[in-house]
Amino acid sequence: MKYIGPDYYDISSQLTEEELLVQKTAHEFVKNEFMPGVKEHYHSGTFPVELMTKLGELGFLGSSLPEESSGAG
């Protein structure tokens, strides 16, 4: 996998392939969807609510997590 930032505690070596894919997906989403507008939203005091649908589609809003991880199952 491509280097995506410092891992001071070597957490990545403890992750499964699936968890590494989630990490990579989150990193790419933030880089490509969130960061381009962060300065504008910061200065205007707004939140990019249009990204919520995309976050949900990617499974980052919790409903797709198993119950043992406090998700809906």
Image (cartoon, rainbow, N blue to C red):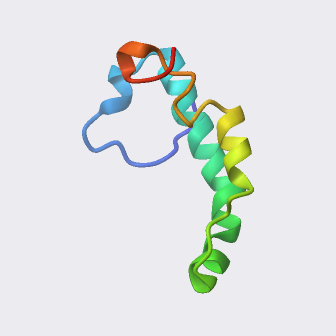
Q: Nearer the viewer, residue 61 or 37?
A: 61
Give left or right: position of 18 versus 39: left
Q: Position of residue 36 (x, y in %)?
A: 70, 67
16 lies above or below 35: above
Q: Looking at this rendering, what residue extends furthest in the bottom direction?
A: 43
How many marks the image carries: the answer is 0
Name the image quarter holding residue 48: bottom right
Q: Residue at x 63, y 84 (%)?
A: 44
Q: Looking at this rendering, what residue extends furthest in the left direction?
A: 9
56 lies above or below 69: below
Q: Position of residue 25 (x, y in %)?
A: 62, 35
Name the image quarter holding residue 38: bottom right
Q: Residue at x 65, y 42 (%)?
A: 55
Q: Looking at this rendering, what residue extends furthest in the front direction?
A: 72
Q: Position of residue 12 (x, y in %)?
A: 38, 29
Give left or right: position of 43 versus 15: right
Q: Position of residue 6 (x, y in %)?
A: 38, 48
Q: Nearer the viewer, residue 24 or 65?
A: 65
Q: Nearer the viewer, residue 69 or 12?
A: 69
Image quarter in which the N terminus is found: top right
Q: Residue at x 55, y 26 (%)?
A: 63
Q: Nearer the viewer, residue 26 or 8?
A: 26
Q: Residue at x 57, y 78 (%)?
A: 42
Name the image quarter holding residue 14: top left
40 lies above or below 61: below
